[in-house]
Structures are given as C-alpha cells and as structure tokens.
Image: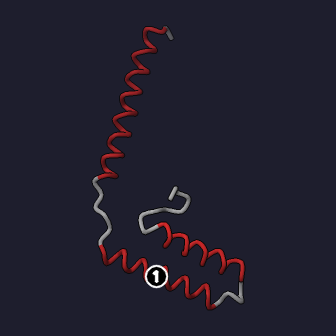
Amino acid sequence: MPLALLLPVLIVLALVCGAIGYSFGRSAALQAPPDAGAINERDVFIEHLRELAWQHRDISPELSTILIDEISQRHRRGPGQLPGSPA
C-alpha cells in the first residue's frame, strides 16, 4: 500500500480511537456518585467481614490476618482509595 494512502487511513484511525476514548472517559465522569446509604451499607458489611475473620481466626490464621490487614489498610487510606493505588 503506498504511503499516500496509508497516512490518511492512520490519521482517521487515530481520530476514531481518540473519539472513542473521549466518549468512554466522558461517560465515566458523568456517572452519579454512590449515595450515602449504599456507602454506609458497604461499611457495615466490611466491618462484619472483619469481625467474622477475627472470630474464626483459628480455622485459617493466615487468611484471617490477610483479611484484617487489608480492611485496616483500606480504612487508613480512606473511602475513596482502591487497593494498590498510591496513598
């Protein structure tokens, strides 16, 4: 394929990919934040998991330690931070 035909095709392809990326980013930005009830329900569930891991630590001490540590780290990082993201 001659360069004269390949260059416009690559430019169009780059523009289409850019438009798709922009639309995905825009739609992600327009999503509504979770409501306070859902956040509270999630926090109650996480606290229940922490208690469950502590109560049954004799079954699998290593797994209980990992769960409790991950939950504790999440609370130290704050509610908006995901595991692995910089603090």
Horizontal side, residue 60 vs residue 5: left or right: right
Q: Is residue 54 above or below residue 1?
A: below
* Count of numbered circles in the view: 1
What residue appears at the point 46 percent right and 82 percent down from the top-left corner? 45
Name the residue carrying label 1. 45
Callout 1: SS: helix
Side of 23 relative to 52 (left or right): left
Q: Position of residue 73 (x, y in %)?
A: 55, 70
Q: How is the image coloured?
A: secondary structure
Q: Where is 4 relative to 23, above or below?
A: above
Residue 68: percent from left, percent from top: 60, 78
Q: Amino acid at mark 1?
A: Phe
Q: Residue at x 36, y 28 (%)?
A: 15
Residue 10 in which image quadrant: top left
| 70 lies above or below 41 | above
Q: Residue at x 31, y 78 (%)?
A: 37
Residue 63 is left or right of residue 50, and the answer is: right
Residue 78 position in % (x across, y down): 44, 68
Tell me the residue at 65%/74% (across/down): 66
Tell me the crowding category of disc 1: few under 14, some 14 to 19, or many 20 or more residues within 10 angstroms, Cα based: few
Camera-nearest residue between 86 and 60: 86
Q: Position of residue 71 (x, y in %)?
A: 54, 75
